[in-house]
Amino acid sequence: MEIESAIVGVEGVAEAAVVGGDHEIKGEAVYAYVITEDGYEEGEELRERVIEGVEDAIGPIARPEKVVFTPELPKTRSGKIMRRLLENIANDDELGDTSTLRNPEIVDDIQTAAGGDD
C-alpha cells in the first residue's frame, strides 16, 4: 500500500496497483501497473518519475522492477482490483478464471504491455 501511495503521489498518475513477482536474481521484485491521468503521456519520462517517487518516499529497496502503463486495471464487478491476475502477469503464469471481472478484455492488453516493456 505504501508503494501504491507513493506512485499515486506522482503528478500524472491516476491509479496504481503493485504486486510482488518472481525475479531470477533478487528472488522477488516490485511490479507496478499504472493508469495515467488524462492529458499525461505514458512513456520513459513518467516511468522514471514513478520510480524516483517510490525511491524518494520509501527508499531504493522498494524500487519497481517494472512499470507497466495500462488504461484500466482488472477489477471485479464490485470494483476490487484483481491483484492475483496482476501477479500472474508479472510471473508469466497461467491466468486462470477471469469470469468475475467486469473488464476481462483488459487482461490481454496488460499482458501485451508487460511483455513489450522489457
Image (cartoon, grey):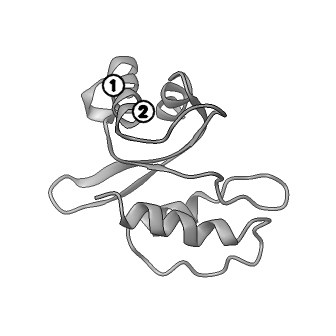
In the rendered image, which quarter is residue 44 located in?
top left
What residue occupies the far right of the structure in this picture? Answer: 78
Q: Which mark is residue 109?
A: none
In the image, is residue 86 above or below residue 46? below
Measured from the top left, where is residue 7 in percent x and y? 49, 30
Q: Which residue is mark 2?
A: 46
The kind of residue on which mark 2 rests is Leu
Measured from the top left, where is residue 12 in percent x and y? 56, 27
Residue closest to the eye, 47 or 15: 47
- Label 1 to label 2, Cα distance in Å? 10 Å
Of labels 1 and 2, the one closer to you: 2
Contact between marks 1 and 2 (CB within 8 A): the answer is no
The residue drawn where x is 41% and y is 41% is 43
Q: From the image, which quarter does the C terminus lie in? A: bottom left
What residue occupies the far top of the structure in this picture? Answer: 56
Residue closest to the eye, 60 or 103: 103
Give the mark nearer the N terminus: 1 vs 2.
2
The residue drawn where x is 75% and y is 65% is 103
Helix, strand or loop at mark 2: helix
Q: Which mark is residue 52?
A: 1
Measured from the top left, where is residue 87 in percent x and y? 47, 62
| In this rendering, position of residue 5 left or right of residue 64 | right
Helix, strand or loop at mark 1: helix
The kind of residue on which mark 1 rests is Glu
In the rendered image, which quarter is residue 106 located in?
bottom right
The residue drawn where x is 56% and y is 52% is 70
